[in-house]
Image (cartoon, rainbow, N blue to C red):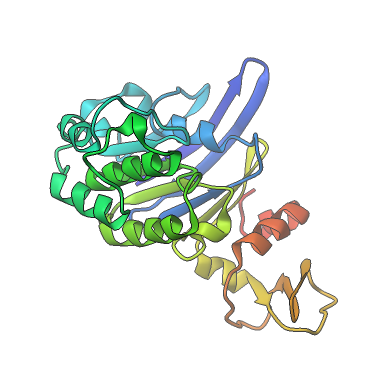
Amino acid sequence: MIKISNLSFSYGSKSVLKNISMELSDGGIYGLLGENGVGKTTLLTLLAGLKKPKMGWISVDGAAPSDRLPSMLSDMYYLPDEVAPVRAKASDFASETGVFYPRFSKEKFLEIMAEFETDPLQRMDTMSAGQLKKTYIAFALATGVKHYLMDEPTNGLDIPSKTQFRKAVMRHTPDDSILVISTHQVRDLEDIIDPVIILDREEVLLNASLQQISDKLFFDYGREIRPEALYLEQTPGGCIQVYPNTGDKESKVNLEALFNTVHKHKELVSSMFNTK
């Protein structure tokens, strides 16, 4: 489990995160959503121990990430948005770097590379941006760690590769792992993200499972305009509306509509999900 308590961080006088508290449970694929500049990457680097909180604390299975304990680092993989074009064959990079992860599997790495249709014998500094990103994703999933922190992993991937990514995540991550995936491309990951975290400037607007969201909000894909709609968007053949679920009805959560609803009604949604 990852616990965050009263976490604050700033760059000089610019506050990015302020008094953030939440818990991330084993087995979750957390979608970390938010506008540019709200602190998504900062939060990931704090979780990875690359930055130290100004105030508050983070606990990853009882350890503080900023202590950089080898036992914690060997069970966590941070994938940044921009990855380095290493002057080495992908298979050699995997073998040399995999020694730092006790559960790393070279066989799994090669299997995922095949699924990604990427050549493990190609030198990484000659790969396209998409091939390079897939190589790092394949390595991350092959480490077998418990905690995966991924910053915009689908950036640079074409449409077939995004499908391959979703399948690989579902197939190759341990059942008790925690994935935190920061993304602007909610449609790329809509089928695998659960729970959802939405950051605003300095605060958490939402941290809830899809079931909790659908219990509180109803996503209507019909034609009739509802006066109680918190958010409405015209679509071909009708519209999508989001309004309070007062009748215990089931609906499929649309992450893009959810995000827009939350940002349009911050105080209301925060009170509905008790984030304040």
Does 275 appear above or below 200? below
Horizontal and vertical percent for residue 64? 35, 29
Horizontal and vertical percent for residue 181? 46, 47
The residue lying at 72 percent from left, 73 percent from top is 240
The residue lying at 38 percent from left, 53 percent from top is 25
Left or right: where does residue 70 sit relative to residue 265?
left
Horizontal and vertical percent for residue 55? 52, 24
Q: Residue 245: in sight, yes or no?
A: no
The residue lying at 67 percent from left, 21 percent from top is 14
Does 105 appear above or below 114? above
Dividing the picture into quarters, in which one does residue 249 lie? bottom right
Q: Nearer the viewer, residue 122 or 28?
A: 122
Q: Residue 221: in sight, yes or no?
A: yes
Q: Nearer the viewer, residue 143 or 28?
A: 143
Dividing the picture into quarters, in which one does residue 52 lie? top left
Does 131 appear above or below 232? above
Horizontal and vertical percent for residue 32? 53, 48
Left or right: where does residue 95 sit relative to residue 61?
left
Does 193 appear above or below 100? below
Outermost top residue: 12
